[in-house]
Image: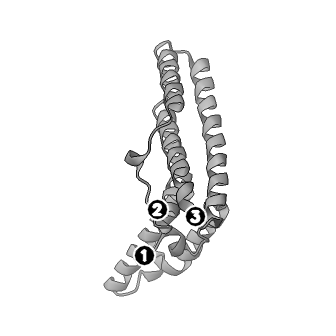
Amino acid sequence: MASPFELLGLPVTFDLDASDIDSALRTAGLKWHPDRFACAPVAEREHAEEQMAEFNVAHACLSNPLQRAIALLEVFACPYDPSGVNANPEFLMEMLEMKEELAMAKDGNDSTALSKLIFDLRQREKRELMQLSQLFSTWESDQNRSQDLPKLQQLLNQLHYLARTIETSY
């Protein structure tokens, strides 16, 4: 099966521009959108629907930086395994404290505190995404990728944790 990068005809890199990802989907839609096959035989319509569904999945994957990172690791035959990564104890402690603060703000109906905590989490997520981008930039050009893989996977774990914490804090 083709990678999301290959399906959309995009370079195999972490740093993709959102407009390029969207443009690639539009280009695929010009050829494969099921509406173009409305008068075609059933088999052709079904094939177009399947193709467009694959393009939509690839677009969703590449539009999400975490999913894009996982797809990139798979392209380089280094699948992401969250269970095989040791968590950073400092990060876990920090997130535990943050979750407690979030719970207190929610329980106390303190929308100002809750908004500030969510803002802080989003800022942290942005910083870690920038760090992930820098790591991938080095990793993509390095032939000895195995030495950076643990760092990448640990950072991915942290970003997953941050995303889940943000998602559940509303």
Report if residue 144 is visible in the image.
Answer: yes
Amino acid type at circle 3 is Asn
Which quarter of the picture shows residue 139? bottom right
Q: Position of residue 107 (x, y in %)?
A: 46, 15
Amino acid type at circle 1 is Gln
Q: CA distance from mark 1 to mark 2?
A: 27 Å
Q: Residue furthest bottom?
A: 41
Left or right of residue 136, residue 68 in this image: left
Frontmost of labels 2 and 3 is 3
Residue 156: image tag: none
Instruction: Name which residue lies at 66% across and 59% down.
Output: 138
Does residue 48 lie above or below 96 as drawn?
Answer: below
Does residue 26 lie above or below 94 as drawn?
Answer: below
Label 2 secondary element = loop
Residue 51: image tag: 1
> Which of the two residues, 142 or 101, is positioned nearer the viewer here?
142
Residue 78: image tag: 2
User: In terms of sequence position, does the residue under pointer 1 or pointer 2 come before the other?
Assistant: 1
Colouring: one colour
Label 3 sits on residue: 144
Which quarter of the picture shows residue 5? bottom right
Q: Position of residue 164 (x, y in %)?
A: 46, 38
